[in-house]
Image (tube, rainbow, N blue to C red):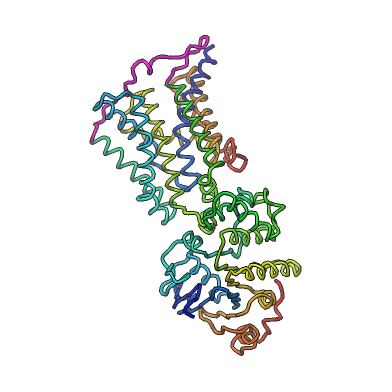
Amino acid sequence: MDVVNALAQGLLLGGLYALFACGLSVVFGVMRIVNLAHGDLAIVAAFCAFVTLSATSLPLWLVAVVTVPVFSVVGYLTQRLLLQRSLQSGPLATLLVTFGLSVVIQNLLLELFSADTRTLDAGSFATSALEVGDVSLSYVGITGLVLAVGSIVAIQLFLSRTSSGRIMRATSDDPQTAALVGADARRVYGIASAIAFATVAMAGIVMAIRSSFDPSLGPAQLLFAFEAVVIGGLGSLWGTLLGGLALGVVQSLVAVADPSSSVLAGHLLFLLVLAFRPQGLVPARAS
Amino acid sequence: MADALLRLEGLSKKFGQVVVADGLDLEVGPHEALGIVGPNGAGKSSLFAMTGGDLAPDAGRVVLDGRDVTRTSVHQRTRAGLGRTYQVPRPFGGMTTFATTLLAATEGAGARGDEALSLAHDALKRCGLAHLANTRGDALSLLQRKRLEVARALASRPRVLLLDEVAGGLTEPEVAELVELVRAVHADGVAVVWIEHVVHALLATVDRLACLAGGRLVADGDPEQVLRDPVVREIYLGQDPSEEGAA
């Protein structure tokens, strides 16, 4: 029964990893940028929700519903004003810019909020769970998994069914040819960033309800997200979902035997995939 | 020519010591078909790259339909009516040919709904790709990829079509088909500028020929006269350029 429970908890944890990772996957797939500030953005979203919640009497769900679209607008602007400039100078420049952004965000958060650990107070929602037999599924965990699957389905539908999505696929395929058919790459990149920021904001808020957070947590979140993307296969969103779930399940199953080896086991899975199946579980072309 | 559709004014570009354009002036009228020949390294592809917006000139202007587009990006020039093919075809590997031309119809030509669908379909049909509408770019043969280059450009409803060596690597019957296609496009009122080594294909299509060498125009005018020009003949090392066959 321990194993079944661990499996279920792993899937919930993996859902949160996938939610973290899908924005990273979109930005990499469309712009070939590895956004090193991705994890820190989640922490920013958590602090934004935390401040709004403390300053107003709004319920948490409303704060979340407001934070996510605000973040997507910030994402669009960040792309147009900051990342677009660095894109023109090659892949190394984008790495340096996002790394710099990560350092600046962490230190700003530290300056504004100190290194104290916080939690988002979600009342009974944070502690109650759905009991299925002997397995207890927390509502927060379920929310993370549902948001992850929902976001990925929505992004896939956007890519395959809408004209903006077709332009995005074309630009990801070959930006020069896309320009030749009249597609404006900057707008496409802005939309991709908006999607990434929206999903990472959701991930940050869910994480902040689930566990405590502080300004230094971003890089660890980035690492899990990055591992989920690579395990699943670069450029494939379904792969990212699968990669996140695999990471969560492995961490959770190993924790049954030895809790202190749980995170290490996830990293080992990542290394094994890199060594024996570098294209990932779901190669991009097949999806 | 005050009513030139495409005008290049004093275009200059250097890569270190290599001059690819040296004060180039060129005008293309609204219903003209202009062929451009020249030895390798003459600056032909750079000329198209600067016209299309991939390459910024060191000096000079690109004027499309009376509007200075020198500082505009590639997609803006496509929307302004400039169609272009790449010398080495670059299809969208993961998209069908129809999705590709549909994108050109909606983004490049600004067509919507049924108009965009029929524009995308017509472009494929004219280029003999209608039966491959659901085939992905990465599954096409070289000839099909070259046709898709043209179809993609046509679907963006260009007023000027820049063709970069589309006949290279094709067999004689394939070149003949291509000539028919370009003639038909030109007959519809689209201005054509065609860079090509397969000179007989140009002679069957264009009403004006220019020869480029060292980043300068060394001859420009009636195709037969340009080919008889002693300077042009010397550039081709004493060969008769019209005897160059399909590579």
Q: Would residue B204 appear left or right of B9 to someone viewing this image?
A: right
Residue B13: percent from the left, percent from the top?
A: 45, 73
Q: What is the quadrant of the N terminus of chain A in the image?
A: top right
Which residue is most to the top? A133
Residue A131: within the magenta? yes
Residue A42: within the magenta? no
Quadrant assignment, res B155: bottom right
Which residue is most to the bottom? B230
In the foreground, B68 or B53 = B68
Residue B197: percent from the left, percent from the top?
A: 65, 74
Q: In the rendered view, would you say A9 is above or below A224?
A: above
Q: Would residue B109 appear left or right of A68 to someone viewing this image?
A: right
In the foreground, A141 or B179 = B179
Q: Residue at x 49, y 17 (%)?
A: A256
Residue B6: percent from the left, percent from the top?
A: 50, 72
Residue B181: percent from the left, percent from the top?
A: 68, 66
Q: How many marks?
A: 0
Which residue is most to the right? B173
Q: What is the quadrant of the C terminus of chain A in the image?
A: top right
In the foreground, B94 or A62 = A62
Q: Would residue B116 appear left or right of A220 to someone viewing this image?
A: right
Q: Which residues are magenta?
A: A112-139
In the foreground, A179 or A272 = A179
